[in-house]
Amino acid sequence: MLVDLPLFLAVVGTSLYLLGFACYIHLVIRRGVSPNASTWLIWAVLGVVNAVTYNSLSGDWVKSVMAYAGALTNGLTFVIAGVSGRFGRLSVVDKVIAAFGLLAIAVWLANKNTPYANGMVMSCFMISTVPTLRSTWREPSRENPLPWLILAVSYLFAVSVVLLRWTQMWDMMFPIVGLFDSLSVALLSLRPSRKLG
């Protein structure tokens, strides 16, 4: 019996993705990381929009399975972090990013152009990572690199799936943005913390 390689890679990649989030949620509960409120709020809402628009765009459930896992895990992380009281105040920049995310959803609902909508959602994901990157730059110990590295590897699997089932350039946007965002946070969190004093 032949193994469907893209399906196998999608299952492995999604399993790694879920493992990365399980590690992250464990750290949130154990107070090992301090999630950024605006980032997780935006990722929770946009995760759902991304899953729907990416599946519609790619027309391929194998490519889309990680996007649906992302919608589920982003929402779960937001809820768990909120219940554990790990959110701080939103800065002006955080509020602007959250407003941009809501604007992207409104534009998508009015426009119904799937490539445009998914492109806006991906732009929001990139922009919404800025508060986490900023806070991790200031204090690398705010984030643990392990879950972010696992997520980065999972996105490499997603890139492989898209390449093996290639139909259009747009399909590559979701895994590339996820890889960039995850790897950026992981690398910043590996930096030595600055000594104050």
Image (tube, grey):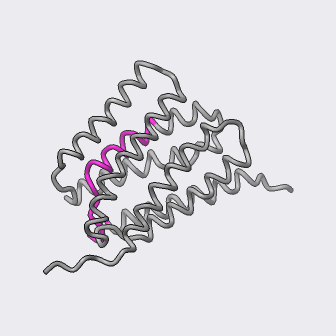
Q: Looking at the picture, does residue 128 appear above or below residue 53?
A: below
- Spot the residue most to the top: 110
Please identify the quarter of the rendering in which residue 105 is found: top left
Q: Say above or below: 78 vs 191.
A: above
Q: Position of residue 76 (x, y in %)?
A: 37, 51
Q: Nearer the viewer, residue 47 or 188?
A: 188
**In front here: 1 or 105?**
105
Image quarter of residue 14: bottom right
Instruction: Please tell me whether residue 114 is drawn above or below residue 134 in the rendered image.
Output: above
Which residue is at 27% across, 55% downward?
36
Magenta-highlighted stretch: main secondary structure? helix
Residue 191: x, y in percent?
A: 36, 74
- Quadrant of the rendering where the C terminus is positioned: bottom left
Viewport quadrant of the N terminus: bottom right
141 in the magenta segment: no
Q: Which residues are magenta?
A: 28-49
Residue 169, quarter of the rendered image: top right
47 part of magenta stretch: yes
Q: Which residue: 40% across, 62% down? A: 185
User: Disc count in the image?
Assistant: 0
Q: Is residue 30 visible?
A: no
Does 197 appear above or below 158? below
